[in-house]
Image: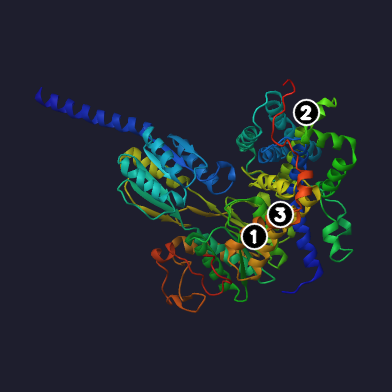
Amino acid sequence: MIVDVNFVGLIIASIMASAVPLILASCGELITERSGVLNLGVEGMMIIGAISGFALMTVTGSLIIAVFGAMLAGVLISTIFAFLTQTLITNHVATGLALTIFGIGISAMIGKNFVGIPGKEFPVLFEGLKDTIPLLSPILFGHSIVFYFAFALPFITGYFLKKTKIGLIVRAVGDSPESASNQGINVRFVRYACILYGGAMCGLAGAYLSMIYTPQWIENMTGGRGWIALALVVFSTWNPIKILIGAMIFGGLTIIQFHMQAIGVRIPVQFLTALPYIVTIIVLVVISRDSRKIRLSTPSSLGKSFHKDN
Amino acid sequence: MHKFLIRSFVSSLVLLFTLTVAAVAKDVKAAFVYIGPTGDHGWTYQHDVGRKAVEAAGFKTTYVEGVPESADAERVLRQLANSGHDIIFTTSFGYMNPTNKVAKEFPNVKFEHATGYKREHPNVATYAARFYEGRTILGTIAGTMTKSNVIGYVASFPIPEVIRGINSFTLAAQKVNPNIKTKIVWAFTWYDPGKEAEAAKALIDQGADVIAQHTDSTAIVQMAEKAGVYAFGQASDMDKFAPKAVLTSVENNWGPYYVDRVKAVANGTWNQKDTWHGIGDGMVVISGLDSQMPSDLQAKVKKLQADLASGKVHSFTGPIYDQKGNLMVAEGKTADDGMLAGMMTYVKGVEGDIPK
C-alpha cells in the first residue's frame, strides 16, 4: 500500500469524526458525575437526542431547531432522572438503567414514522480550504460546527472544573455534599443543573449521529455508544483530556481495523473487532495509574443520594 | 320425501362445510417473530412489509420484535402458539432449534422458519430467498462500472448466506472484468449505521469506487454518496437515500409468499415444504436501474435478470474453482442447492480468509 500523507489525513479525519459523539456524551456525563450523580442513562438520552433531532429536522426543515431541539429533549428526559434521584431520592443506578430502557423504547415509538426517510445535508465549515495544506487540511477543514465544538469541549470542561468558581462548587458538591451544604450551597440545585447539562450533551451526541454522521433514523442507532461513553468517563478517571485520548483511540482502532481487513492483514477478524475495547481500556488504565491523582479526581460521593433534611 | 330428506341433508352438510371453511378462513391468525426492530429499514422491516400484506389480505396478524435467538425465542413461540395463532413465521436463522422444539409441542400450529434447513416435524416448513441471484446482477454492474478495479464489500457475519453472496457477486464481476479485486471487510454486525459507515469509508479510502453491502442500514450508500462512489441498496430500495450513488437495489419481497401460506392454512392445504424462491418467483426483486448506467449495460442486466428468472442462467455455473484452485463446480454443471446451502469457502478471486 502506498502511504501518502493525504491518505493518512483522511484516516485521522474519519477517526475524529467517529470520536465526536463519544466526546460529547462523555464530557456531559463527566460534569454530572463530578457533581456526585451517576447517570447510567447516557445511551437512553443519546437515542432520545437522535430521534428528536431527526424528527425536528424532518418536520420543521430547520437544522438549528433540530440541533437545539435534540439538546432540549436530552434536558427534558434527564429532568425525569433528576426529579427521581434528587427530589424523590431514588437509587441512581436503577433509575439510570430505567432511563436507558425508557429512552430506547420511546425513541422507537416516536421513530416509527421516520424510518426510511433520508436525512438532510448538514453544512460544513471551511470547505474551500480542503486542499490547501497536505495532511492537515482534511483534519482541520470541512467539518460540521458540532465537530469543532466537540474538540473544544474537553478543554472547556477542564478549564471550567479547575479554574472557575462554579467548577469548584460542582466538585465540592460531588466530593462532600454535606460540607458543601453547610457552606450554603444548594446541593440539589447544583446536581439538577449538572444532570440537565449532561442530558443536553448526550442529546447533542445523539443528534450528531442521526443528523450528521449517518443522516437517517433507525431504531437503536446509537449502537451502545452511550455505554462506551460511560466507560470512558470512568477509565479516564474523570479527566476530560483523557476522555479525548480514549475516544480517539477507540474510534481510531475501530477504523484502523477495517483498514487492516481491507489491506488483507492476516490477523483473526474477531480479534481485530475486539481490539478497540481492549486497547482503550488498557491505555486509559496505564495513563491513569497514579493512585493519588485518581483519589483526587474521583468524586467521593459518586452515586450516593444526598438527603438535606437528615 | 325420502329423496328430499337426503337432498336437504346433503345440502345442509355442504352449507355447514362452506360455513366452517368461511369461519376458519376468517379466523386464521398469523404471528411473526422478528430478530430486530421493525424500524431497521432492512431485514425485519421487509418482513413486516410482508406481514402487512397478510393483513391487507384480510387476516389477523401479531408480531413480536427484537426477540433474541435464545431461550427467549422458545418462550415467545410457546406464548404465541398458546394464544390461538394458527401459523407462526420465525424470521431469523437462529430460531431454527427453538422453532422445531416448540413445533413438537403444538402439532396443530404451523411453523414457518426463514433461512433454516431443519424440518423435524410435519408442521414445520422452511423458506428462504435466493438473494445470490440478485448479487449476480450487482456483480455484473460493479464489474462494468468500476474504474479503479477495486470493489469494496461490507460483510456482516461469516455464514453460508453471506459467503454465497460474496462468491456470486465476485464470479459475476470477474466475468465482465477479469481485473477486478474484491476487498472484503467484516463489520460483525447486521446493523450499526456508525460502524457500517466507517467500514465503507475505509474501503473507499483504499481506492474502492463501487461498494456492495451485506449489512442492513442505509449508512453505507450515504457514505458512498458523500464520497462520490457507487453503491447498491440492500433489502429495500435505497435510492432516495443516495440518488447518485445507488445504481440499483436488491429488495426482499416476502409478501406474496406469506399471503399464500396463510391462505393455505385457511383452506386446509398447508403442507410441509422447503421453499427457496428467487427472481423468477418474485421473492427477490431488482429495483429500477440508475440512468448513470450505460444503456448497453442496462440491456445486459435486464436480459440477465430474465435469464436468471427463467433458469436459463444460474449464478453458480462451472467451472468454478476455490481459492486454492480446487474445482468446486465442473464445467457445464451448476452448483446444487445442497452445496449452496452449506457454502463456506471463497471462490477463486476473492481475497483474504473467511473469519473462523
Disc tally is 3
- Residue visible at 61% across and 57% down in the picture: B248
Q: Which residue in the structure is indicated by mark 3?
A: A285
Residue A112 shown left or right of residue A133 in the figure = left
Q: Which chain is home to disc 1?
A: A
In space, the residues marked 3 and 2 are separated at their CA atoms by 31 Å
| Within-10-Å neighbours for mark 1: few <14, some 14–19, many 20+ | some
A295 is higher (above) or lower (below) than A82: below
Residue type at tag 1: Leu
Q: Which chain is home to disc 3?
A: A
Residue B194 shown left or right of residue A126 in the figure = left
Protein image colouring: rainbow
Q: Which residue in the structure is indicated by mark 2?
A: A178
* Residue B192: image location, x then y, percent: 62, 50
Residue type at tag 2: Glu
Marks 1/3 same chain: yes
- Residue visible at 85% across and 25% down in the picture: A184
Q: Tell me if residue B290 can be seen.
A: no
Q: Tell me if residue A65 can be seen.
A: yes
Tag 2 and tag 1, C-beta contact below 8 Å = no
- Residue visible at 62% across and 72% down in the picture: B181
Q: Which residue in the structure is indicated by mark 1?
A: A275
- SS for tag 2? helix
Looking at the picture, tell me which residue is in the foreground, B274 or B292: B274
- SS for tag 1? helix
Mark nearer the viewer, 3 or 2 = 2
* Residue B314: image location, x then y, percent: 46, 67
Compare marks 1 and 3 and give the one earlier in the sequence: 1
Quadrant position of the C terminus of chain A in the picture: top right
